[in-house]
Amino acid sequence: MLLLTAVNLLTADGLLEARQEFDRRNLYQFFDPGSFDNDLVLDSYLLPAVAQGSKLSNLHLLNLHRDRLAYIARKDGQAVSVAVPAIAEDGFNGKIDLLIAVDMFGRISAARVIEDINSDQLYGVVDVIDSKWMNEFAGNSMRDILRLSWQPITAENEYDQFVGASITPKSVANQVYDALVFYQSNRIELMRGSRGG
């Protein structure tokens, strides 16, 4: 029985490491190469789905259905960017998972749709869906988002990449805007980190 317990623990540890490595590899596309020197997966902040008792303001703006992680990029110990998860609800398929990386000046370094993985796991969930239209958020701040919300998605910029053409630009842009409001409201707290940070 002891041997079986040990094997189960080793298997669980190996699975956790594999999930963390999966996220670690995918998170690299949210931050400029060389802009950070920490472990993005372990230097993170636990965002609860329920705001009750949380230190965070405007948590409801992220529209989370389960606990998720925000990922902090640091260079020489100083936070340079934070990737915040959010969910846009206005798609034909129900919901769209997003991850938005924002630098310390409030500019978006990357915004991506991530594959919805029906899991309560914190790791192994950063599976990015490529989209040229989402790349247009990079370099923008809060005041620029509304312009993008009315910009059409055409065949040229891969409308079909969005889970079978299932979202509207306005709903995604509105959710990105809400994520920026959340970020601005909690920037100092997020930079501290709460897991492994």
Image (cartoon, rainbow, N blue to C red):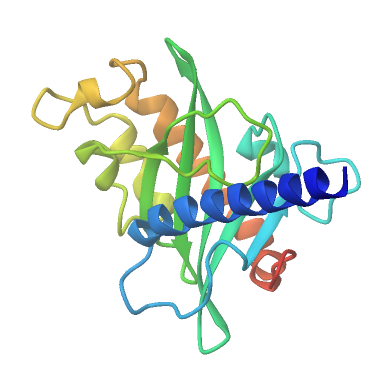
Is residue 147 left or right of 81 when viewed as pictured? Answer: left
Of residues 2 and 71, the one drawn nearer to the viewer in this rendering: 2
Q: Quadrant of the C terminus?
A: bottom right
Give the side of residue 86 with respect to residue 132, left or right.
Answer: right
Q: Position of residue 176 (x, y in %)?
A: 46, 41
| Front position in the image: 97 or 15 | 15
Above-or-below relation of 41 to 37: above
Taking the spot 68% from the left edge, 47% from the top edge, the residue there is: 12
Q: How many marks?
A: 0
Q: Residue at x 40, y 51 (%)?
A: 143
- Is residue 182 visible from the viewing direction of this image? no
Q: Quadrant of the N terminus?
A: top right
Q: Judge from the rendering whether residue 176 lies leftward or rightward of residue 49; answer left or right.
A: left
| Residue 26 locus on image (x, y percent) | 39, 52
User: Residue at point 29% right, 29% down?
Assistant: 150
Q: Residue furthest right?
A: 53
Res. 101 visible in picture: yes
Q: Relative to residue 21, is residue 73 depicted above or below? A: below
Considering every residue shown, the one lying at the far top of the view is 92
- Front in this rendered view, residue 67 or 23: 23
Quarter of the image for residue 72 reads: bottom right
| Residue 147 on image: x %, y % | 30, 39
